[in-house]
Amino acid sequence: MFKKLYLVLFYLLIVDIAKSEIPNIEDRNKKEIKEGIANTYLRSMTKWDIPFDDLLENKSGAACIQWNKATDSFLKDGMFDALGYSQNIPNKNASQIAAISGCNKMKEYYKLGDTCKCEVVLTNNENQVNLPIKKFNKEKEFLEAVNLYKKEKFRDAFKKFLKLSNMGDKQSQYNLSILMFKGKGFPQNFKKSYYWSLSSKLYGELKSDSIIEKSISKLSDAEILEVNEELKSNLEKVASSGNIHAIVPLAKWHMVVPKKPDFGKSYKWLSVASAFNIKNTKAARDKIFKKLKKESISSIQDEANEVYEEIVNNKKAILNKGDNL
């Protein structure tokens, strides 16, 4: 009964998840793609006997890029059809504008139309490539996974549900647990069924209790404990890596999974969540705070601050590197 009261509080917590992907070159190393575009530009310039490295600063280079054809093969041996460059310009911004202008003139001369777009590639030997980012349509992916399930293409549905589950989608996690419990597309696996059903509960799925009970009835106490710890460990890794959608489920884990709620650990993660301004976490944090002993508060807050800084730094690293998420 005690845990249920706190579950009501935690079910109010909502986590918004944003995910971005590059069209047509998904699941490839984004840093390598950016370097490949720059190398292709330099290779294309040599065709015109213009060594970019010899140009005077401020200098910029632009190319008419056709992203849907930016295959590994093209980035290794291909050439851009239209180029632009500038040198000895008063500032970087002006040099980029001049390079784009030159690229557009060449694009018009060769009548390339809308087949490509002139974009800045290099400025003073610094990679300026902006990969074409589009928002990941979570709702569309989920509906496609459901349709695959209805068509009994269970393995294909599993792949989409797994991708969404790793992004913190509670419905997909619930559906994964059903697939694993029933053994559709894969042999039955009650440990995985329990893992995903418990995860979906922590992310706020209200339907999960039934499949959780069915799953744990098939497992030993040792197996249940193993799955509990595995889920906590994975949530910690996901949160620490910079993906904040795992923070609230971690706070909930410490309240609803152990036999005795750990208010200190829950308060720590809710403090981190509140620092990221995740909806409703401040109220939950303040409610848990009343359960703490005064002598432990400062040390818990210090831990929360360390975790928060780690997550912030890792989020920055992901953005700076532009590597796969």
Image (spheres, helix red, strand yellow):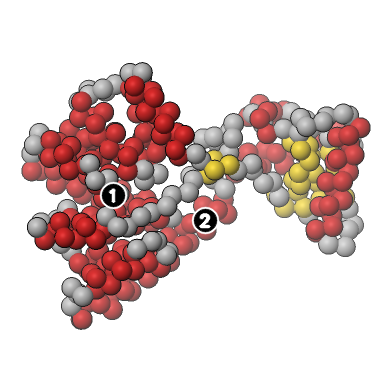
Task: Give me the disc on residue 204.
Answer: 1
Location of residue 66 in the rendering, given as x and y in whole percent from the top left corner = 72, 32
Q: Dot 1: few (<14), some (14–19), or many (≥20) neighbours within 10 Å?
A: many
Residue for point 36% across, 35% down: 162
Q: Do labels 2 and 1 touch, CB within 8 Å?
A: no
Location of residue 293 in the rendering, given as x and y in whole percent from the top left corner = 18, 78
Distance from the alpha carbon under mark 2 to that under mark 1: 29 Å
Q: Is residue 5 left or right of residue 76?
A: left
Residue for point 42% across, 52% down: 16
SS type, badge 2:
helix
279 up-or-down from 289: above or below: above
Earlier residue among tags 2 and 1 = 1
Residue for point 10% across, 34% down: 218
Residue for point 21% across, 35% down: 193
Q: Is residue 31 left or right of residue 304?
A: right
Q: Is residue 307 left or right of residue 28?
A: left
User: Please, what is the three-letter code of the amino acid marked with disc 1?
Assistant: Gly
Q: Is residue 123 left or right of residue 246?
A: right
Q: Nearer the viewer, mark 2 or mark 1?
A: 1
User: Please, what is the three-letter code of the amino acid marked with disc 2?
Assistant: Ala
Q: Considering depth in this image, is 241 or 257 the residue closer to the camera?
A: 257
Quadrant hosting residue 223: top left
Q: Considering depth in this image, is 269 or 41 the residue closer to the camera?
A: 269
Task: Give me the disc on residue 317.
Answer: 2
Q: Is residue 231 visible?
A: no
